[in-house]
Image (cartoon, rainbow, N blue to C red):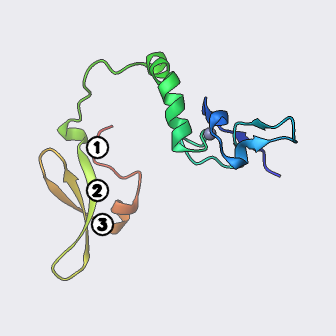
Amino acid sequence: MSELKLCQGSKCHTYFTKDRLKGTKGSKTYQTRRRSNLYYGNGNFCSFNCQHDWFQEFGDKAIDHFGRTTEPKHLTEENAWYKTLDWNSNDDRVYAYVNGITKEVISLTREQYRDNNYTLNER
Ligand SMILES: [Zn+2]
């Protein structure tokens, strides 16, 4: 049996759902959800609500701990390339690299389009 993960939501145990109510008569408690898989927040939360609760309580501290963005970041021409897929007038697939700033278009082969390591971006 795979190990169960506990939801990291700080209020998970306060939501009145049947699946959270555990124990025998006289000693029942609402408990934090345990699942083999959790599908929110990188597998740490049982629901968007629990993810949101956690962020409300700890988000500011987490951002300050890992470094708050204090100035705008810039995406320059050199790094503004994105892959796109279109159809030509013959209904053939056409693969291209488009620069989001200059709007320059460069044709790609299907292999280049599918290759996640192929990029024109400098970083
Ligand atoms: Zn939860």
Above or below residue 65? Residue 31 is below
Q: Secondary structure at mark 2?
A: strand
Residue at image coords 32%, 49%: 119
Q: Position of residue 114 (x, y in %)?
A: 39, 62
Q: Which residue is mark 3?
A: 109
Q: Which residue is mark 2?
A: 83
Q: As shown in the figure, which amino acid type bears the numbered disc 2?
A: Lys
Q: Is residue 35 visible?
A: no
Q: In this image, 37 relative to 104: left or right?
A: right
Q: Nearer the viewer, residue 116 or 42?
A: 42
Which of the 4 image quarters holds residue 107? Answer: bottom left
Q: As shown in the figure, which amino acid type bears the numbered disc 3?
A: Thr
Q: For the view shown, which residue lies furthest in the front direction?
A: 26
Q: Which residue is mark 1?
A: 121
Q: For the view shown, which residue lies furthest in the bottom direction?
A: 90
Q: As shown in the figure, which amino acid type bears the numbered disc 1?
A: Asn
Q: In this image, 79 relative to 37: left or right?
A: left
User: Of discs 2 and 3, which sits in the foreground?
Assistant: 2
Q: Which mark is residue 98?
A: none
Q: Is residue 50 visible?
A: yes
Q: Position of residue 103 (x, y in %)?
A: 13, 51
Residue at image coords 70%, 36%: 32
Residue at image coords 48%, 27%: 56
